[in-house]
Amino acid sequence: MTLPVTLSAARAAFRRDHPGIVLLQASAPHEVTEYLVAQGVIGPEEAPVRVAAAGEGNMNCTLRVITPRRRLIVKQARPWVEKYDHIPAPWNRSLVEAAFYETVAAVPGVGDRMPGLVHADPDARVLVLEDLGDGGDFTSMYTGVRLSDGERDALVDYLVRLRRIDVPAHRRAMLKNQDMRTLNHEHIFHFPLVESNGLALDGITPGLQSAADELKRDARFVARVGALGSRYLEDGDTLVHGDYFPGSWVRARGGVAVIDPEFCFLGCGEHDLGVMMAHLILAGEIAADVDALERAAANGRADQRLARQFAGVEIMRRLIGVAQLPLSVPLERKQELLGRARRLVLAA
């Protein structure tokens, strides 16, 4: 297997081309300490620090740093996907994420449901964020743990309030986030439906490849997904989180919180609504949860049909695309979900 060579080559090339930028890592806490002191984030009296990986993030190196006085999250973007170093990724995504945090910081119901931005280093593409604690994310939903009504209502309210934000003119160009949108578009709307794309779906669930191939042969479905992908790429005025699923929702001391807006953009807000709806369905939705989301969409003057169509795409790509979920269900359930995805996408 040649993958480790590829990973080493990517890192070696970066170190050669950017000798002044340290690649932070949990295995080198002394380098993390020196970096944070040099940036003025912590004082020398707070050293040394304890460092550990924070969560199972795919895109970035995300570390939990503990000093004698406080806990911080240190997040560094590289010009690749952290979990798959052979896949290039826009290096400026941390700059966009910082702009998102700055834009929403003072917005009730949005900024106070996210970690505070403590420090941003645009050269090293590092963000230092408030640590919301060890409560973990909501991916346990896929194994049967339900959202409470209060958690669901808070998550829906966040989206309603996010849609109302008037983004300042000086941040609009940055928040278009076209490079990250292009990367995400490939993995949401295109790659899952490519014939012979190399994904060994039967290794995930025996028989899933046949179900995927059947969907790929549905010309109406493929064409509608393509049209929705074009809509996703259109610029707009609504601030969109861009990856609004249980892995971006965390249990914080004050209740449910939202993290990781690196896929944010100014565009179609129905995408966030659709993604949330999709994951409620994938987790075995309670009708009341979907009803609450749809009521909020209606009250926020969102296009409910478009939101449902985005939900269908998200279900499809999570079942037959690269970004798999910890979803332990039999083939029959996945076939049912793919059928539902088709109906949602093709809804008139």
Image (tube, rainbow, N blue to C red):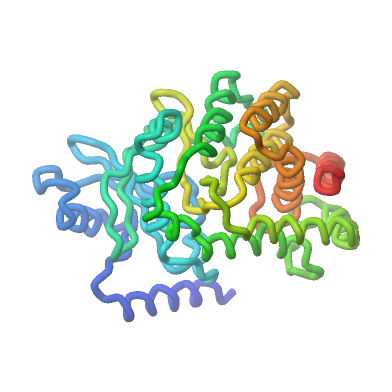
Image quadrant where residue 50 sits: top left
- In the rendered view, tell whether residue 103 sits above or below residue 106: below
Q: Residue at x 69, y 61 (%)?
A: 230
Q: Quadrant of the C terminus?
A: top right
Q: Residue at x 66, y 37 (%)?
A: 302
What is the x, y in percent for residue 89? 50, 66
User: Which sits in the foreground, 121 or 268?
Assistant: 268
Q: Residue at x 39, y 44 (%)?
A: 103
User: Which sits in the foreground, 127 or 52?
Assistant: 127
- In the rendered view, tell whether residue 273 sits above or below residue 180: above
What is the x, y in percent for residue 211? 87, 54
Image quadrant where residue 95 sits: bottom left
- In the rendered view, tell whether residue 67 sits above or below residue 227: above
- In the rendered view, tell whether residue 232 sits above or below residue 114: below
User: Which sits in the foreground, 48 or 259?
Assistant: 259
What is the x, y in percent for residue 104? 40, 40
What is the x, y in percent for residue 13? 39, 79
Q: Could you tell whether 235 is left or right of 348 in the image?
A: left
Q: Quadrant of the N terminus?
A: bottom right
Q: Residue at x 41, y 29 (%)?
A: 108
**Residue most toward the left?**
45
Q: Could you tell whether 161 is left or right of 277 in the image?
A: left
**Count of all numbered marks drawn on residues in the image:** 0
Image quadrant where residue 9 sits: bottom left
Q: Could you tell whether 238 is left or right of 191 in the image?
A: left
User: Which sits in the foreground, 117 or 8?
Assistant: 117
Q: Could you tell whether 28 is left or right of 290 in the image?
A: left
